[in-house]
Image: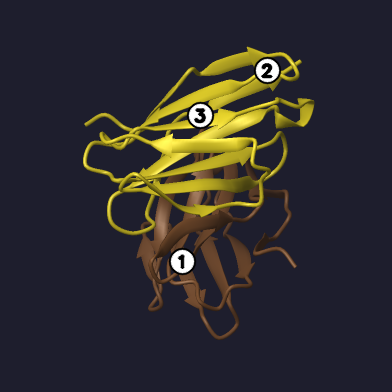
Chain colours: A yellow, B brown
């Protein structure tokens, strides 16, 4: 069974640009979570989607947004990129409850 | 106060040692608790769930103390392959599945 897949694995953008990160959950999982992990720091909760709706949002500015599609895949958009947005962005999925499984992440570098 | 706090580490132990990590959480409504393992530059992987009655998986034992709002992870007979960062994760309450993570405790097991 395929795990959580994220694309791209690496992304380099310049300050002010927009970045789009994608996540495909494990088959049958309806919840998708997004986390940011800056170098040397813990995972910071960004967004939680379930059944196509945003269920909760972390303490991030509105330029971080996303959506979940009918097939439960998800997209994270970061507008007006800043240097401090450079981080590993992790997507996780779960079916019924909080036990979540992570993808390998997208490493975003803003230059 | 952070939502989830962990021993900062690092823990450097010899092979065969027993090591314990603690994690405290601030949200008394939290319902689900987990330990994840994260290898360098990799995604977190679920190690074990933590139940009120405590649970054991081979050399790993997890405990939950709701009254004091902490969870613990005990690793017996440490192996070199146990070297990693251990993250505790805590859900936000009933029907609120997104988790908050501690910053992680780094463990290095030496020959």
Q: Nearer the viewer, mark 3 or mark 2?
A: 2
Q: Can residue B31 be spotted in the picture? A: yes
Q: CA distance from mark 3 to mark 2?
A: 20 Å
Can you name the residue that lies furthest to the bottom here? B67
- Of all chains, the one bearing label 1 is B
Q: CA distance from mark 2 to mark 1?
A: 44 Å
Q: Is residue B90 above or below residue A20?
A: below
Left/right placement of residue A29 relative to residue B53 reads left
Which residue is at a point 65% across and 64% down the rendered structure image?
Answer: B3
Q: Nearer the viewer, mark 2 or mark 1?
A: 2
Left/right placement of residue A64 relative to residue A103 reads right
Which residue is at a point 76% across and 15% down the rendered structure image?
Answer: A111
Residue matched to label 2: A17
Residue matched to label 3: A105
Quarter-wise, where is residue A5 in the image? top left
Give the crowd class for mark 2: few <14, some 14-19, many >=20 residues within 10 Å. Answer: few
Q: Tell me where residue A56 appears, x and y as whole percent.
A: 50, 55
Q: Tell me where residue B63 appears, x and y as whole percent.
A: 48, 72
Give the crowd class for mark 1: few <14, some 14-19, many >=20 residues within 10 Å. Answer: many
Q: Is residue A80 above or below residue B18?
A: above
Which residue is at a point 21% across and 31% down the rendered structure image?
Answer: A1
Q: CA distance from mark 1 to mark 3?
A: 27 Å
Left/right placement of residue A63 relative to residue B35 reads right
Q: Is residue A57 above or below residue A25?
A: below
Give the position of the C terminus of chain B as an image quadrant.
Answer: top right
Residue matched to label 1: B62
Q: Secondary structure at mark 2?
A: loop
Left/right placement of residue A69 relative to residue A18 reads left
Mark linked to residue B53: none
Cβ–Cβ under 8 Å for marks 3 and 2: no
Label whose residue precedes the other's in the sequence (3 or 2): 2
Q: Tell me where residue A68 appears, x and y as whole percent.
A: 38, 38
């Amino acid at each position: 069974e395929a795990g959580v897949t994220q694309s791209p694995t690496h992304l380099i953008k310049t300050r002010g640009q927009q970045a789009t990160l994608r996540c495909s959950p494990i088959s049958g999982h309806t919840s998708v979570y997004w986390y940011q992990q800056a170098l040397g720091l813990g995972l910071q909760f960004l967004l939680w989607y379930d059944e196509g709706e945003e269920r909760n949002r972390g303490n991030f500015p509105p330029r971080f947004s996303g959506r979940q599609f009918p097939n439960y895949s998800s997209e994270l958009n970061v507008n007006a990129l800043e240097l401090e947005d450079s981080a590993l962005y992790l997507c996780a999925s779960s079916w019924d409850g909080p036990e979540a499984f992570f993808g390998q992440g997208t490493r975003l570098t803003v230059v | 106060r952070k939502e989830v706090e962990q021993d900062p580490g690092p823990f450097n132990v010899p092979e065969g040692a027993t090591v314990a990590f603690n994690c405290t959480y601030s949200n008394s409504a939290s319902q689900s608790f987990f330990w994840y393992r994260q290898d360098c530059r990799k995604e977190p992987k679920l190690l074990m769930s933590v139940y009120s009655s405590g649970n054991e998986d081979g050399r790993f034992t997890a405990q939950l103390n709701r009254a004091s709002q902490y969870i613990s992870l005990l690793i017996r007979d440490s192996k070199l392959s146990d070297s990693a960062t251990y993250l505790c994760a805590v859900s936000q309450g009933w029907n609120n599945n997104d988790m908050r993570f501690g910053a992680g405790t780094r463990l290095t097991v030496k020959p």
